[in-house]
Image (cartoon, coloured by chain):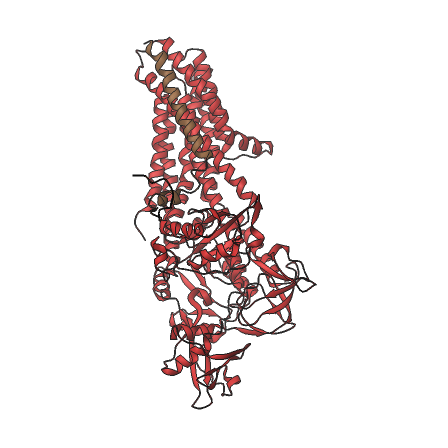
Chain colours: A brown, B red
Amino acid sequence: MNIIVYLIPVAIGLGLLGLVGFLWSVLSNQYDDLDGAAHRILIDEDAPLKAGPKVSE
Amino acid sequence: MTAFTSPVETGCPSGLAPPSRAVTADFSPFVRKKNGLNTLTLSVRGAKCGGCLSKIEMAVSAQPGVQQARLNLSNGKLFVAWTGETTAEEIAGRVSGLGYGVSAFSEDTSANAAKSEERGLLISMGVAAFALANIMLLSVSVWGGHGEMGEATRNVLHGISGLIAFPVLIFSGRHFFQSAYAVLKHGQTNMDVPISLALILAFGVSIWETMTGGQHAYFDASVMLLFFLLIGRFLDARLRRQAHAAAHDLAALQNRSINRLSTSGRVEAVRAEQIETGDMIMLAAGERAVIDLKITKGESGIDESLVTGESLPRTVGVGETLYAGSLNLDHPIQGEALSAASDSLLSQIADMLEAGEQKRARYRQIADKAVTLYVPFVHTTAALAFLAWLMIGASVHQAILVAVSTLIITCPCALALAAPVAQVVASGHLFKRGVFLRSGDALERLAEIDHVVLDKTGTLTLGTPRLSSEHGSELAQAAQLARASRHPLSRAIVDAAGAGPIAEQITEHAGLGVEGWIDGERFRLGSAEWVGQPETPDTHMASLWLVGEQGAPISFKFEDQLQSDARDTIDPLKQQGFSIEILSGDTPEAVARVAERLSIETWHGRVTPTGKADRLAALQEEGKKVLMVGDGLNDAGALALAHASLAPGGAMDVSQSASDAVYSGGLSAIRTVLGVAKRTKWVMLQNFGLAAAYNCIAVPIAVTGHVTPLIAAIAMSASSLIVTLNALRLNRGTP
């Protein structure tokens, strides 16, 4: 049963990680426009290529 | 970039909203400048889908100097940041050119407060969820190891749970504690008092149990309670904020700039709120008056359909008063600003609005009624259970445990979720159908409606005249003259004739007609009196005459067209048992014609704004629950006074803010709203019924002392889940 001495802190640590991620997403305004985010992913960004020295092959 | 290949396609590419081109006034007073970077927030109406999003953002980004253009699809705010010479008007014009309504948006401080409250609740909810998950992890081991787990291990697990629960309870529970403390200070009570009591007692008993090595700790139950309650609280706050944002949005429509004439004769664009009594205002042709004016110079035809409901334009001259909401049709005019505080139409209507708001504040929601029943019931039951256990010889410790478990399990979660979830689902459902609900409790009032009062101009009818007589080549000639005019009748002729050439040397005479040369012949298009024809009374809404130098004069007849779905809306409403009535400011003849065509028996014509409000008060006196549907400034008082009210999307701003919901896409929305409201109320009642039924089962178990933390956890989550799932049914099917 000594294993729980490690496992419980690990579990709580993972939970905290998730919590931090959630707080970050809230504080960086990611829930402000739920409708827009759903549509934005579908927008085709095939704008004309800009002239420049760097051309990816 | 397909959006640009077809210039004809305007508005939402998915057809979710009709294209509109709102007034493009002066936006420069709303631009904020900082380090050479200009920023502007625009309120965009009509953007509904991803197509709109990319169309608008790409078009604006393509403007020179624009660094960022981001549209928030949820609330229709377009944020633009740019440098250089591009003006705010060019940017706004770009958006309105695509077929969307644009108005300037100024930041609202109270909205920010509401937003931070909502965000605070969301964070508290996340923290509670984290704690719940971790405590459950430990609790499940305790439940699973029941009988086998050693006492030391159990105590350690309880201890860790308590260490997690304590800070979370303080952090996430503060919303309830603060609110409970605030009302208790005033000797009152609300839902948060039993909630706080249950949370504190459950936590306190659990600490005691842990320290004395007891079997049951309720850390999981108290955090779960907190989590579910925060969901309800968050949904409620979100709905309220959206309603508030909608109101502010509508107010933002007033954010049109006004052209003020300074004493030196210079014209400057200023915001409406900067105007003071006595300021000289310049009103260009095609511009809508934002404040009441007394005309000092010029003469012009004005469209007052939004103010009085009169469908035909009127000519005003020096010395006359022009009310806010009137549209100047053909000539620039100058006027002196009349203070809103004076005895203007706007201030009268503002008084009526206030009276209506106060009346509505007195409306008691179902949820409030449920709480007043619930709180004494739970507290008495818990107290009685405590006393009863003491009397049959249990220890104080055991009796307290029973009382606390009663408080926990008669969980207000289901109760706290019952109304908000149903309202959130219903308002989302209505939003998809083009109805924007301004407050959640409006649904309850809408569900009680039995009498529908409709305005005529702009609500039952399109509000714009349509050519109703048949013509051949004369129509093309008339159109050549009409293309130079903004008068509604001219517009109707152009609509019928389509695109084409324009006559030469056109002059427009305010309130009379248009004169011009076509192929060397002088033509006049205007009123019968002006062209020298006898006025013939007939059943039409209006007529125009076209007179040339040779040939017989031709008359064009116009009609105010009914909304295409008027009949299909009114007939089923009647069948469903609603009584229907028309209340219009237009002439009795015009109202009678519409009433006859829709077979509506009760109608009133030429009703003043106060008359409308009086009529509504009389109807309410009779005990009728009235739904008012109207768009004009003259309806605003009645809209505020009615039991519930609706305004079409094209309505006057004041009317939109006075009503409970704003709809787009035709009258059929009335049926949708009433149907959804009825179903929502039914679902809410079901939810309260479910919560009550749950308590009927849970209370005996708790009072008899059979509640373990496991049972409390299952019962609480099950009841909340059932209530939520029941509310989600609102999304399915259509009435």
Residue B286 drawn above or below residue B701: below
Q: At 39% from the left edge and 27% from the top edge, which residue is drawn?
A: A18
> Whole-percent x and y of residue B636?
53, 59
Q: Is residue B292 toward the left or the right of residue B623 in the image? A: right
Residue B623: percent from the left, percent from the top?
48, 57
Residue B139 position within the rendered picture, expressed as x and y whole percent measured from the top left: 36, 19
Residue B39 is left or right of residue B675, and the answer is right
Q: Relative to the observer, which residue lies in front, B39 or B727?
A: B39
**Residue B351 picture location, percent across and down:** 60, 57
Q: In this view of the protein, can residue B483 be seen by the observer?
A: yes
Residue under the point 49% across and 34% down: B120
Q: In terms of depth relative to the viewer, which is nearer, A19 or B305?
A: A19
Report the residue at 56% width, 50% height from top: B31
Whether B527 is drawn above or below B47: the answer is: below
Left or right side of B621 for B74: left
Q: How many marks?
A: 0
Choose between B5 and B16: the one closer to the eye: B5
Nearer-the-camera pick, B65 or B42: B65
* Residue B562, quarter of picture: bottom left
Q: Going by the picture, which residue comes out furthest to the front?
A: A53
Q: Image height check: is B669 above or below B158? A: below
The answer to whether residue B704 is seen in the rendering is no
Q: Looking at the image, which residue sits at the far right? A: B263
